[in-house]
Image: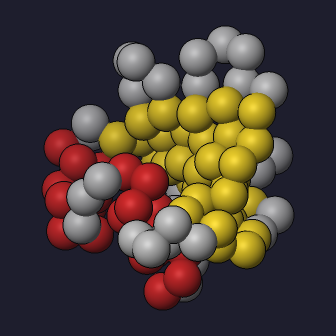
Amino acid sequence: MKVQNIESNKGNKIANQFIIYDDFGNTFFQSYNSIIVQSNDREVLLDQKYWNYSNTTGKYRNIFLGETITETKKKIKSGEYILTDLNR
């Protein structure tokens, strides 16, 4: 498992915003103590409670996913992204 801070556009490490890589091909975005996104080659899972919890979470989720909130919402609606409980 590998953990790194998300970096700003200027290359600064952002406190409390993490990208986690596990040994099974999953990549996670964690904001503070909550997993927001889990992704791999097959699917993208968003935490149903925290995926759009705050402006800060949204800003770094967008960076992690490489898209806007509008694009994310469309993918949730289409079923491409799945809402689930990632923080059991």
Residue 58 image point, x, y percent: 45, 74
**Residue 48 at what x, y percent from top left?**
55, 57
**39 displayed left or right of 70:** right
* Relative to 71, 31 lies left or right: right
Q: Quadrant of the N terminus?
A: top right
Residue 8 shows in this picture: yes
Colour setting: secondary structure
Q: Is residue 12 above or below residue 22?
A: below
Image quadrant in which you'd find residue 69: bottom left
Residue 38 vertical position relative to residue 30 in the rendered view, above or below:
above
Estimate the x, y position of residue 22 in percent, counting from the top left.
72, 25
- Residue 72 in percent (x, y) is at 27, 58
Front residue of this view, candidates 62 and 35: 62
Q: Residue at x 58, y 60 (%)?
A: 6
Q: Residue at x 40, y 26 (%)?
A: 43
Q: Quadrant of residue 2?
A: top right
Is 48 or 55 nearer to us in this picture? 55
- Please state if 1 lies on the left or on the right of 67 as rendered: right
Residue 86 visible at all: no
Q: Furthest residue to the top?
A: 24
Q: Say left or right for 60 vs 33.
A: left
Q: Is 31 drawn above or below residue 44 in the view shown?
A: below
